[in-house]
Amino acid sequence: MAAMSNLMLKTVLIVVTSLLPQSSCRYNGKYRVLGSSPIEYITTANFSLANLPNDPHLEFRRCHFTSFGPDMFEALKPSTRRVTFRKGTVREVLIGPTTRLERIQVIDTGLIALEAASDEPNYQLKQLTVRSRKFSEWSPSLASLWMLEEIDVAYCNLSYLNVQWLERYNHLKMLDVSKNRLMVFDIGMSSVPTLERLHLWGNHLKELQRFPEAFPKLKKVTLAQNRWLCRWVANIRGAILSQDVELMDMDGVCRAGWQINGGLCCRSGEDRKAATSQRKTNEKSSIHGGHDFIGMNGSVFGMK
């Protein structure tokens, strides 16, 4: 009898939940065990009426916001430290200096713009994640997020990233810009002394200047599936080995006309005009080439 009562109660709860209007705030407590409290079908128009739960991790699913800014972040409960936007529509996110969150994730919402609302520093946010093929520009305004430790913008649409924009992140340990369409990762004379992990695989990069010396604490890097020039690959080995950086990936079969060099696909030829332009916009540095070294266990560039 008790089992039958429990079954009837569960059935009633399921029916009641399914009858909630799509414009309402749907909060399902069963996800507490997974560490997040999902909220569904909120829009900009009814956000102020939503009864947001007092939980550390909120996940907005299939919600629709033209812009989610400082005032809306301020409306979250003080105990909320992490927010995820998943599916739905969030075109713009503005992070203010008083935003209390430690982590923000924006996943598959069609995000176009991510910016800081002012130049005043934010001392709370530590992790930032974006997944959006419409996200194509990193805003220099985000330099005001001083406490960032991890930036994950993999599977976006960035074609250019200037390392100078990252110099103010004195706590940055991980940068993931893999699977974008980066043609230039502009290091110049900039440096990120705290960076330990760098993910660049799956882009359109040909070479990097002052690498890895611009990242003196770098421990792990991914470089596969790019358009490296063989002369750069040959020159960079010694620097990677001497700095004891671990290459976490390697290419398999290369496309026609390309060759494998120390685990990375590269090409010998280069458009002379493009090379001249590259030299004008990037300052050359001397990188000591090392020996052609592939370990007995198949490791390359010091892969462990």
Image: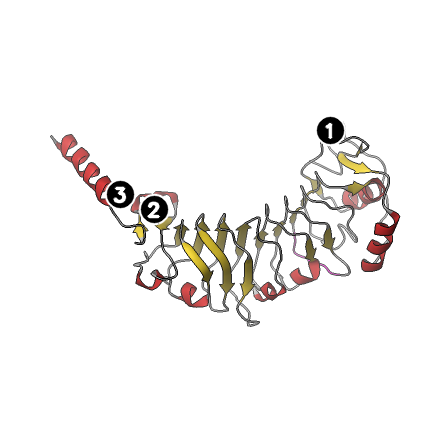
Give the SS element for disc 1.
loop
Three-letter residue code for mark 1 = Val
Three-letter residue code for mark 3 = Ser
Residue 58: x %, y % from top left: 39, 53
Q: Nearer the viewer, mark 3 or mark 1?
A: 3
Give the SS element for disc 3.
helix
Q: Nearer the viewer, mark 2 or mark 3?
A: 3
Residue stretch in magenta: 190-195
Identified at 78% across, 47% down, the residue is 207
Q: Quadrant of residue 251?
A: top right
Q: Quadrant of residue 220?
A: top right
Q: Which residue is mark 1?
A: 253
Identified at 58% across, 53% down, the residue is 135
Quote the CA–CA distance across marks 3 and 1: 51 Å
Quote the CA–CA distance across marks 1 and 2: 45 Å
* Label 3 crowd (10 A; few <14 / some 14-19 / many >=20): few
